[in-house]
């Protein structure tokens, strides 16, 4: 007869612990349970660098931080904060346009999915190693093509970029003048289809 009494107390104890756990779980705050304004402040703190500049590496495997992959709701709420409040910096060497091109295609996809989303915070600079003669011809052609297609995303060097140091041969000087002329021609074709 004592066994049923022990069983009743055990069941009552189990029910009490389940109730205690559910109350504890409900009281524990989680990100999506707080007000949107506070979540936006948290997203800004987590996603925007202090100076607002993000250097994009040519070796980056993904373009967005992992926090944007947590849930669909977090991604929808925080993506605009990440893309619109940071300035993305590229340093391009030897006119290799693939990193900035992949980035631009990602932005076009974002803008297509969200028509109100207009991204303009990107700065690309050409490192001085570009004026070396060993530039890959494929890189040149791709760069010229995309300078015309994405004029706001690709920097166009001017004559001062190709300043020649003493000791360059006349062939090197001719190559640099050709490069400046090619970029000038693409710049002049900007309004053409």
Image (cartoon, rainbow, N blue to C red):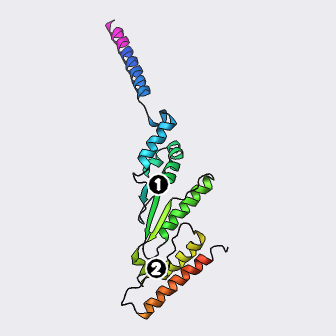
Residues at badges 2 and 1 in contact (C-beta under 8 Å)? no
Q: Is residue 63 visible?
A: no
Name the residue: 48% across, 41% down: 40
Q: Residue furthest bottom?
A: 170
Query: Can you see residue 123?
Result: yes
* Residue carrying label 1: 86
Taking depth in this image into account, of 115 and 165 the one nearest to the observer is 165
Who is closer to the viewer here, 97 or 189?
A: 189
In the rendered image, the residue lying farthest to the front is 160
Instruction: Indicate yes or no whether the magenta region holds residue 8.
Output: yes
User: Which callout, 2 or 1, points to the residue nearer the camera?
Assistant: 2
Q: Residue at x 58, y 60 (%)?
A: 108
> Where residue 133 sits: x, y (%)?
42, 85
Question: Which residue: 49% across, 82% down?
Answer: 137
Instruction: Locate residue 163, reporting x and y percent.
Output: 43, 82
- Distance from disc 2 to disc 1, alpha carbons, whole Å, reads 29 Å
Q: Quadrant of the C terminus?
A: bottom right
Does the magenta segment cover residue 24? Answer: no
Query: Disc 2 or 1, which lies upstream in sequence?
Result: 1
Kind of element beneath mark 1 = loop
Image x and y of residue 42, in percent: 44, 41
Relative vertical location of residue 188 with respect to residue 81 in this rendering, above or below: below
Front-most of residues 183 and 27 = 183
Classify 109 as above or below 162. Answer: above
Give the magenta part as a residue range. 1-9
Q: Which residue is mark 2?
A: 160
SS at mark 2?
helix
Magenta stretch: helix, strand or loop mostly:
helix
* Callout 2 crowding tier (Cα within 10 Å): few <14, some 14–19, many ≥20: few
* In front of the other: 86 or 78: 86
Which corner quadrant of the image does residue 10 belong to? top left
* Left or right, residue 148 beside residue 7: right
């Amino acid at each position: 007869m004592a066994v049923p009494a022990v069983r009743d107390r055990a069941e009552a104890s189990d029910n009490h612990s389940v109730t205690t756990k559910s109350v504890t779980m409900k009281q524990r705050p989680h990100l999506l349970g707080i007000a949107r304004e506070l979540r936006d402040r948290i997203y800004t703190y987590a996603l925007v660098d202090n100076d607002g500049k993000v250097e994009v590496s040519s070796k980056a495997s993904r373009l967005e931080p992992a926090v944007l992959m947590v849930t669909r709701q977090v991604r929808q709420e925080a993506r605009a904060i990440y893309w619109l409040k940071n300035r993305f910096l590229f340093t391009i060497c030897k006119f290799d346009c693939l990193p900035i091109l992949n980035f631009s295609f990602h932005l076009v996809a974002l803008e297509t999915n969200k028509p109100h989303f207009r991204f303009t915070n990107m700065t690309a600079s050409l490192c001085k190693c570009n004026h070396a003669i060993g530039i890959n011809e494929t890189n040149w052609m791709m760069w010229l093509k995309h300078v015309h297609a994405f004029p706001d995303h690709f920097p166009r060097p001017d004559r001062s970029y190709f300043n020649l140091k003493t000791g360059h041969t006349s062939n090197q000087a001719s190559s640099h003048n050709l490069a400046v002329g090619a970029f000038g021609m693409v710049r002049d074709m900007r309004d053409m289809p």
